[in-house]
Image (tube, helix red, strand yellow):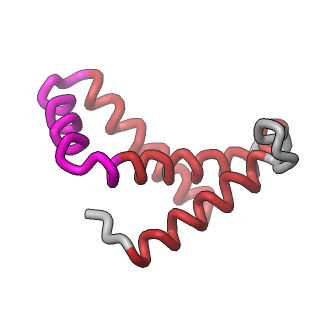
Amino acid sequence: MGFLAFCLLVYVVAITIWGAIKSQEERAKLAAEFSAKPAQSIFVLLWVAAIFMFVIGIFAPIFGEAEFFDSGWPIWQVGGLASLAGWIVTWFWKID
């Protein structure tokens, strides 16, 4: 089930990127959305990146077991903790 949710997330990200590449109106819409709420846009970007780090680290251990900089933590653990922290932040901060 988690893998299917990850595939759906990859699909949404890919469609958004493809739309931004193909359409100038889509690029303008994304830029306007970022300009209107930059903190929320950066938060969502970091949260999605953390989810990718976690899931790819779980399903591709060759990447996930690599050390996150020199912290001693594997990448999948850092991604998992950041994903959990992002989810907890959404309890207190409404993301539109």
- In the visual, does 44 lie left or right of 71? left
Residue at left 43%, top 46%? 45
Quadrant of image for the C terminus: bottom left
- In the visual, does 94 lie left or right of 79? left
**What residue occupies the far left of the structure in this picture?**
25
Q: Position of residue 38 (x, y in %)?
A: 29, 46
- Which of the 4 image quarters holds residue 22? top left
Q: Which residues are magenta?
A: 22-41
Q: Position of residue 83 (x, y in %)?
A: 58, 60
10 vs 77, nearest the viewer: 77
Residue at left 35%, top 32%? 17
Q: How many marks?
A: 0
With respect to residue 89, does 19 lie above or below?
above
Residue at left 18%, top 33%? 26
Q: Position of residue 28 (x, y in %)?
A: 15, 31
Is residue 32 rendered magenta in the image? yes
68 vs 11, nearest the viewer: 68
Is residue 75 rendered magenta in the image? no
Q: Position of residue 16 (x, y in %)?
A: 32, 38
- Which of the 4 image quarters holds residue 32? top left
18 vs 72, nearest the viewer: 72
- In the visual, does 44 lie left or right of 49? left
Quadrant of image for the N terminus: bottom right
Residue at left 57%, top 66%? 85
Magenta: main secondary structure equals helix
**What residue occupies the far bottom of the structure in this picture?**
91
- In the visual, does 61 lie left or right of 4? right
With respect to residue 52, does 14 lie above or below?
above
- Which of the 4 image quarters holds residue 14? top left
